[in-house]
């Protein structure tokens, strides 16, 4: 009942976050949403993401695949593994040029802030890859988490919840 009463306020807040300082463009029938500015702290933790640094198709050598199969945990799978998988990145660092299969595959590492670990997309043009951060998805996930914490906080009354929601930034 509390959520139903204040759904209009939540919708306004959601819309504000969605359209505040961002733009949308179309890439291969996928709408990529990006903020105009990337705000990042130089001291924050980063993750490493493997990308193809040349034109052509990214392919991993059989040697790298076998090493990954030996080291991976039981619940991970090579074909669905993330490019930021620490095991995968470590194998690349160990093998160097032997990591790649074929002349049109040249793996490199790009670092991104850890907070965007679940909010990046690898895009490619003729095999040359780059990282796109979906800043709006990151902000909305963060906002959703904060709203959920406020609404599930049983130590404050509904009026205080409303005040906290109104004062969110």
Image: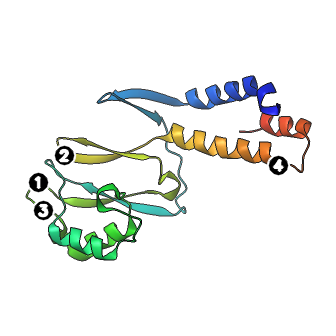
Q: Secondary structure at mark 2?
A: loop
Q: Disc 2 versus disc 4: distance between alpha carbons?
A: 48 Å
Instruction: Give the label, 1 or 4, closer to the camera.
Output: 4
Earlier residue among tags 2 and 4: 2
The residue pinned by badge 3 equals 101
Residue at 15% x, 47% y is 55
Earlier residue among tags 1 and 2: 1
As drawn, the label of residue 153 is 4
As drawn, the label of residue 104 is 1
Q: Secondary structure at mark 4?
A: loop
Residue 108 lies in quadrant: bottom left
The residue pinned by badge 2 equals 127
The N terminus, quarter of image: top right
55 vs 93, left or right, is left
Earlier residue among tags 3 and 4: 3
Density class for disc 1 (Cα within 10 Å; few <14, some 14-19, many ≥20) is some
Residue at 9% x, 59% y is 102
Query: Does 126 sit above or below residue 52?
Result: above
């Amino acid at each position: 009942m509390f959520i139903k009463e204040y759904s209009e306020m939540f919708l306004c807040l959601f819309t504000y976050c969605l359209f505040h300082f961002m733009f949308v463009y179309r890439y291969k029938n996928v709408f990529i949403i990006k903020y105009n500015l990337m705000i990042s702290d130089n001291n924050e933790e980063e993750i490493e993401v493997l990308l193809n640094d040349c034109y052509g198709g990214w392919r991993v050598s059989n040697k790298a695949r076998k090493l990954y199969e030996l080291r991976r945990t039981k619940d991970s799978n090579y074909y669905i593994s993330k490019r930021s998988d620490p095991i995968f990145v470590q194998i690349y660092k160990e093998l160097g040029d032997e990591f790649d299969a074929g002349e049109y595959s040249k793996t490199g590492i790009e670092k991104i802030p850890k907070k965007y670990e679940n909010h990046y997309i690898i895009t490619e043009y003729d095999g040359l890859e780059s990282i796109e951060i979906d800043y709006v998805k990151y902000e909305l996930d963060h906002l959703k988490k904060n709203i959920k914490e406020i609404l599930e906080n049983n130590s404050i009354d509904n009026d205080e919840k409303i005040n906290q929601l109104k004062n969110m930034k």
